[in-house]
Image: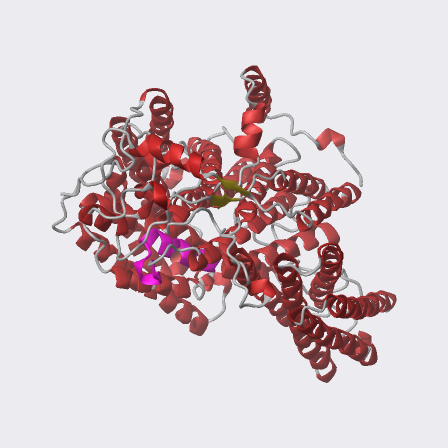
Amino acid sequence: MGIKWDEFFITGDPLILGSQIAILLTMIGAVAGITYLKKWKYLWTEWLTTVDHKKIGIMYIISAVLMFFRGGMDGLLMKAQTSRPEMEFLNSQHYNEIFTTHGVIMILFMAMPFLIGLMNVVIPLQIGARDVAFPQLNALSFWLFFSGAMLFNISFVIGGSPDAGWTSYFPLAGKEFSPGIGNNYYAVALQIAGIGTLMTGINFIVTILKMRTKGMTLMKMPMFTWTTFVTSILIVAAFPIFTVALALMTFDRLYGTHFFTVSGGGMDMLWANLFWLWGHPEVYIVALPAFGIFSEVIATFSRKSLFGYKSMVFSILGIALLSMVVWVHHFYTMGSGPAVNSFFSITTMAIAIPTGVKMFNWLFTMRKGRIKITSAMLWALAFVPCFVIGGVTGVMLAMGAADYQYHNTLFLVAHFHYVLIPGVVFAVFAGLYYWWPKMFGFMLNEKLGKWHFWLFVIGFNVTFMPMFFLGLNGAVRRAYTYSAESGFAPLFMLSAIGSIVLAAGFAVFCYNIYWSIRYADRNISSDPWDARTLEWSTASPVQFYNFAKLPEVKSLDPFWHMKKKNEGLTLHDSEIEEIHMPSNSWLPIYMGVIFGIAGFFLVFEWHIAAAVAGIGIFAGLIIRSFDYNEGFHVSKEEIHRIENAWRKTEGEVHDHVS
Amino acid sequence: MSAKVDTSLPLEYQTEQDRMNILGFWVFLGAEIVLFATLFGVYGVLYERFAGGPTHKDIFVIKDVMIQTVLLLTSSFTMGIAIFEMRRHNLKGLITWLVITLALGAGFLFMEINEFIHYAHEGATMQTSAFLSSLFVLLGTHGAHVTLGIGWATMVIIQLLKRGLTPTTARKTFIIGLYWHFLDVVWIFIFTFVYLKGLVA
């Protein structure tokens, strides 16, 4: 086993020592706080063992905000290091670790859970269902994601961070060139989180296919439901590739196989191909639900039906199909020849067509609409021009021949930040402001929301716009410093200043959450935005069974038409029936913990300990197999009481469509 | 979530939750197809990279592989009979055929482990060359699936003995049946693209 205890905790760097102390104090503080407030039982029964899709969604979102903080700190450290030429704030090794964890955390532990969180909260409500198809599996998905995320996050204080980039290309990521255990964290933690994501994909496919309420045909589904459905299909089609790639990486690093090694007949570019066969669809796995959020927000605040609904659906399907056949554009310089590169150039550029269709549809939705400028709508408005910059530079990069110039420069880095920040981060902020009242029964402060918006958007542009020009001037990515003679200093400085504004925007967002929890008005309607889809037809915060009576859908924007025709809004006592709901379970969190422990041992290559923990995994599976808990029934009286509590309140009249 | 039972359908399809579980498992099998397709792809890239180590012809013993194939294909057939007995509500027949299926599966596993031991004696291990790495991981993944399937089906048999044929136990049996047939399909591809192709190369 060869345990090197002296290398167990990372020592010698004041930044990391500070983090270790901070982590320890936070943990002690959290445990002490919960104990003092006597909240352990509440935490266990209401949250940790819950199978309620809304609570699981909220846990996803909380984790995502925490991960946003971690990934953002990494970003700020990078910007500090490159703010001046020849800075000695971080050494090259530390810089390598930070850009690696920044990338992995932002994509897999921030963007994914943020979107999956919103999907969890919203999708069953939008399709008029009482939960997802497999509620306990849903909880397991969350706990596996959380376990993977925590395992990945402890790497920088215990054992060492992965340092081969978020793409972890071989041969660099192999044992030969990265002998430490850092990259084991990458292989194992992402595997655990990936299994959770795969199960989320399966769960949402079945939920959307089988659990839509009466009358909601596929072409009457809200756009966010459509995008979630297509994203789930992409997850099922792409994540197993990553599962295999990571498993082979684990074998190469732990057991001396020769898949990607330079010796023994291995092929390093095989890793790059497998990685991007998953990695490119992954970009659309995060972008498509974001497009869905914008569609909901723009339609609601333009007070119009979404323009070109059918073309929206077909462009989503087109994007999903194309996303599977563009992966080689990430490494034109591999040298696969002009024919191959041309093919992938063309498929890549073709993605601009369905995406362009969507852009025009959003613009036409707003045309002649009575637009309300709320915080959520602002994010959607800013998304359009910012994302177009990302898209157009994407078409530039798509040209195989020209890409030899842009490859590995900051131009590329600026491009994908212009795609992912407007395309995903703006979307999750829009979605969060929009659905916050549905989740918690009060709104986020709109004034602070606008501060958050302006600081973030201006900061974002000031940070990343200079990087286009730096890249065109030849500044390469992943370089920890540059010389004064290069002339890059002013733009790098500008970019660093922008990142501080960006961070200020995020800080206002956090303050907004705090302020709103303490002071926001609790006495709001369940439909504060005068919205169009079914999630707004029930209480805010949503009662645990979602709908006392499952709604019936006759058209697109069903809730809008229900309000307009004043039908289906009231509930007669005779319509109340007992509701069957699933019971809480301790198994998902147990599985998360045991997977985390087994993964941790595997990272350190303590195989006997990992095998023992592996027995725990099988024990969990066996217990689940013999678990015949059929759930419980909610009595009519309880439903009656809960429904009366919100329906009889002042202002709860659903007839204010003008 | 509804507990409505539609008795006109076969047992395993009678409740909405059971229908969803079966559809969910089909989607999962879709993911499994992608997983094995990737492993086949990797094997297809690396299968002639011997790095001076043994080649296909040096290590493959076609007679043993034929026996393995016959065992596994027969087990798929007996699994089919087991589900047929389930449809006839014949619990005893169902369990008998399930046990026969698992015995054949165990026979297959025994042969596969022997095959691996034989390879190791020939000096062909996972660490020898890229070809052998991809061979062992492809075969090993399939073998691990068979092992898991045997363990899982044993759990289902215990539940059948304890609870008899109910919509839930019938659904569990039906799903393990789907899984078992899937492993058989994967084996046909392994037999064709690994063993036969290796021998004619």
- Nearest the eye: A52 or A577: A577
Q: Is residue A25 above or below residue A554?
A: above
Vertical position of residue A588 compared to residue B199: above or below: above
Specify the farthest residue to the right: B121
Count of residue discs: 0
Quadrant of the image occupied by residue A482: top left
The magenta segment is A216-234
Q: Which quarter of the picture shows residue A505?
A: top left
How is colour applied across the structure in the image? Answer: secondary structure
x and y, in percent, of residue A442 in the image: 32, 29
* Closer-to-camera residue (A559/A650): A650
Q: Position of residue A133 (x, y in %)?
A: 50, 52
Q: Residue extending furthest front?
A: A574
Q: Toward the viewer: A585 or A246?
A: A585
Q: Can residue A320 be seen in this view?
A: yes
Q: Quadrant of the C terminus of chain A?
A: top left
For image coordinates 44% across by 34% down, the residue present is A65
Residue located at (81% from left, 74% from top)? B59
Quadrant for the N terminus of chain A, please: top right
Whole-percent x and y of residue A283? 43, 53
Q: Tell me residue B199's x, y (percent).
A: 74, 82
Of residue A454 and residue A212, the one placed in the foreground of this image is: A212
Residue A491 visible in the shown view: no
| Residue A68 sits above or below residue A334 on the image | above
In the image, what residue occupies the spot 22% across and 50% down?
A: A561
